[in-house]
Amino acid sequence: MADIHADVLRRQRRHLLRVSLRRNYDLYLLILPVVVYFFIFHYIPMYGVQIAFRDFNPVDGITGSPWAGWKHLTRFFNSFYFMRLIRNTIGISAYSLIVGIPGPIILALIFNEVRFKRLSVVSQTLSYAPSFLSTVVVCGMILIFLTPETGLLPAVFDTLGLSQPISMIAEPGLFWHIYVVSGVWQTIGWGSLIYTAAISGIPVEMYEAAIIDGASRMQRIVRITIPSILPTIVIISILSVGSIMNVGFEKIFLLQNPINLEYSEVISTYVYKSGILGAQYSFSAMVGLFNNVINFAILVAVNWVARNVGETSLW
């Protein structure tokens, strides 16, 4: 009896799938290039992940290279740079999350409370304009502003009466602050657009009822606006925390120098130097695989916590 019931359910699902394909064929055709792209450039290359468990030699190929097992992962764990890489990667990412998650929310709330719409539009445009700058341009601006001889920093020091400005980019302890602050400046406006769109979907009647009841502006923000956009906040936070081990390679690499390397070397730059510059393909593949597995585990854990605590999750 159970087999008959299961067979009926399978037939019903196949029938519904055929009906959906006939009705929405145009939508499926629209998404087809995206599916093909991810299949070709993201799923097929996963075949090469096995070089992380081999002593890869380009002459012998992937399958011809000898099996190494967990050799490269053990080497990474025993490496002198292991703790430094983990500290810098997690530290920079956590710092960016702590500052970067609430920043766009606060900015969106401020824009929502601005009474002069023209001022709000101009402010929003100015806030997300830096998002259109490339990482190379932003890093160039940072280096120019922090140059001791000709940058903005000497002018500030002169104004304060200090004649010996230091090179901030050469101070290892300041690297995290430079990276995070410049990142927030570049992305806070663009990130606020998501929350601004979510706020615009809140029914106006809720605010009008709160005003009639005598609620202040701050009470309306706390009681209406924030709870209404809370699902959006949770989803964005889960996605952000799920990539905590992925610190942007380009910006880190462009701002690195031999002096600040102690606080600027992260897993992504280490993989590049080991794999591309050092030709240690198997070792760098194992380090990258380790990084992605940790990211995936954190994403699943955070999603589970969000689903059980707030009933909002990715799946």
Image (cartoon, rainbow, N blue to C red):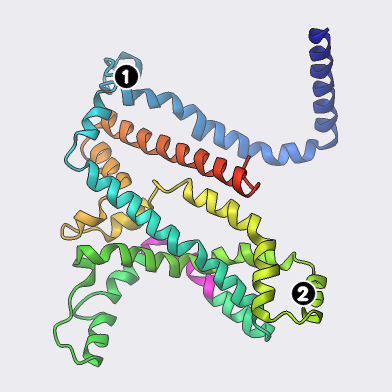
Q: State which quarter of the image contains the N terminus.
A: top right
Q: Position of residue 119 (x, y in %)?
A: 62, 85
Position above or below: 207 against 14:
below
Residue drawn at x 64%, y 70% as measured from the top left: 222
Q: State which quarter of the image contains the C terminus.
A: top right
State which tag comes first along the sequence, 1 or 2: 1
Residue drawn at x 23%, y 48% as measured from the top left: 84
Residue drawn at x 66%, y 61% as measured from the top left: 229
Q: What residue type is disc 1 on?
A: Gly
Direction from residue 248 to residue 41 in the image, left or right: right
Q: Is residue 130 magenta?
A: yes
Q: Which quadrant would residue 13 be assigned to in this image? A: top right
| 130, 156: nearer the viewer | 156
Q: Which residue is mark 2?
A: 207
Residue drawn at x 56%, y 72% as measured from the top left: 107
- Residue 306: mark: none
Q: Which residue is mark 1?
A: 61
Circle 1 crowding by C-alpha within 10 Å: few under 14, some 14–19, many from 20 = few
How many marks are shown on the rendered structure? 2
As measured in the structure, the alpha-carbon distance from the residue carrying label 1 to the one carrying label 2 is 65 Å
Q: Which residues are magenta?
A: 127-136
Mostly what secondary structure, the magenta segment? helix
Q: Position of residue 243 (x, y in %)?
A: 45, 47
Q: Is residue 186 magenta?
A: no
Q: Which quadrant would residue 141 be assigned to in this image? A: bottom left
Q: Which quadrant would residue 216 be assigned to in this image? A: bottom right
| 14, 5: nearer the viewer | 5
Position above or below: 39 against 114:
above
From where the camera sits, is residue 137 visible?
no
Q: Farthest left residue?
A: 164
